[in-house]
Image (cartoon, helix red, strand yellow):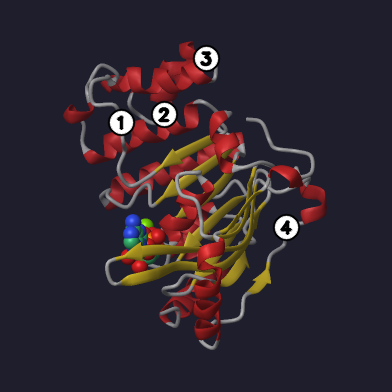
Amino acid sequence: MVNESGPARAGRIATYNDPASTARSRRATCAESDAAAPVSTDTAVDRDSAGGSAIELRGLAHDYSTDSGVVRAIDTVDLDVAPGEFVSIIGPSGCGKTTMLRAVAGLLEPSFGSLSVLGGSPREAQRDHAIGLVTQEPGLMPWLTVAENVRMSLKLAGRPDAVDDWLRRVGLDRFAGLYPRELSGGMKQRAALARALAHAPRLLLMDEPFGALDELSREALRMELLKIWERERSSVLFVTHSIREALLLSDRVVVMSGSPGRILKDLAVPFARPRSDALFVDGEFLALEERIRVLLRTAN
Ligand code: ADP
Ligand code: MG
C-alpha cells in the first residue's frame, strides 16, 4: 500500500470560516473556555521524519443548527495523523467523533478551522479514491452479491481479479455468491471491510466499525484488521468505544471530552508489533487501559 510522502501542499488545505457565524462562535468559544480541559500530548511520533501528515486538523470546530439553537459538536480540535499511523479516537457518546470523521471524509464542511487530508482537501482525496470508509452500517449495495460488492471496489484499484483473495482474507470465500440480505451482521461487516480495504486506500476512516457485532465476531474481525494493517500500513483514523480495542490496534489513542468534543489527551501506545491479544494480560497494557478509563470517567 502506498504511503503518503512529501510535505502537505499548504495551498490546497481546506480552510473553513463562515463569516456570518464568526461572532457567534467567538462568543461560544469564550463561554466554553473555562470548562476547556488542557490538551496534552505525549506522543512518540517523529513528525519530521514522517514527511507530512496524512491528516492535519487545525482549530477544527463544527456547529449544527437545530430547532432549539446552535449545537457545537466539536471545538478547536488540533490533530495530526502521520502517514502509516494508526490513531484511535475514544470519547463519550455525542462528543463529535462521527462529526470529525465525516469532516475528514469530505462528507461535511466544518464551520471553522482548517483541514488537510493527504496533503490536499478531503474532496480531492475522495476524488483520487484515496479514502476507505467503514461505518457501523455496512452500506453494501443490496443488489450485488458479496463478491460483486468487493469487485466494484477492486476495479478502482485496477485489480478486479483479486476478489477471491480478499474474500479469503476476511473469511467470506464460501459466501461469495450471497446477497447482503442473506448475511449475518458480522458477515456484512466483513464484506464492508474487504470492500474498504481492497482498493488499497492511503487513508482508512473507521467509525465504530465493529460496534454492532457480537463479541466473538468483533474479536475475530479486529485481529483480521490488525493483520491486514500490519502488512499494508495505510494511515488509519479509527473511532471506537472499546479501550482494549484502541490499545491493541493503535499507535496513538486520542481521548476526547464530552460535548462539545475537545481533545483531552493524546497517548502514545508503546507496544511492539506485530501485536496479539496476549497483550490483554500485559501489566503495562492494563495500566494504560486503566489510565484511559479514568480519563473517560472525567471526560463528561
Ligand atoms: P459521536 O459520534 O461522538 O457520538 P456525533 O458527531 O454524532 O457524536 O454528534 C456530536 C453532537 O452533534 C451531538 O450533540 C449530536 O446530537 C449533534 N449532531 C450530530 N449530527 C447532527 C445533525 N445532523 N444535526 C444536529 N445535531 C447533530
Ligand atoms: Mg458516532
Q: Is residue 193 left or right of residue 110?
A: left
Residue that label 1 marks: 140
Label 4 to label 2, Cα distance in Å?
A: 30 Å
Q: Is residue 203 left or right of residue 108?
A: right
Label 4 to label 1, Cα distance in Å?
A: 35 Å
Label 1 to label 3, Cα distance in Å?
A: 19 Å
Marks 1 & 3, CB-CB < 8 Å contact: no
Residue that label 4 marks: 45
**In the image, residue 11 above or below residue 142:** below
Q: Amino acid at mark 2?
A: Arg
Marks 2 & 1, CB-CB < 8 Å contact: yes
Residue that label 2 marks: 195
**Residue 47 coordinates in the image, percent (x, y):** 77, 55
**Residue 194 coordinates in the image, percent (x, y):** 42, 30
Determine the residue positioned at 28% across, 34% down.
Answer: 187
Residue that label 3 marks: 159
Q: Earlier in the sequence, mark 4 or mark 1?
A: 4
Q: From this viewpoint, is residue 245 visible?
A: no
Mark 4 vs mark 1: in front = 1
Determine the residue positioned at 49% across, 56% down.
Answer: 100
Label 4 to label 3, Cα distance in Å?
A: 33 Å
Mark 1 vs mark 3: in front = 1
Q: Amino acid at mark 4?
A: Val
Q: Amino acid at mark 1?
A: Leu
Q: Tag 3, which secondary structure?
A: loop
Q: Residues within 10 Å of mark 3 (few under 14, many from 20)?
A: some
Q: Tag 2, which secondary structure?
A: helix
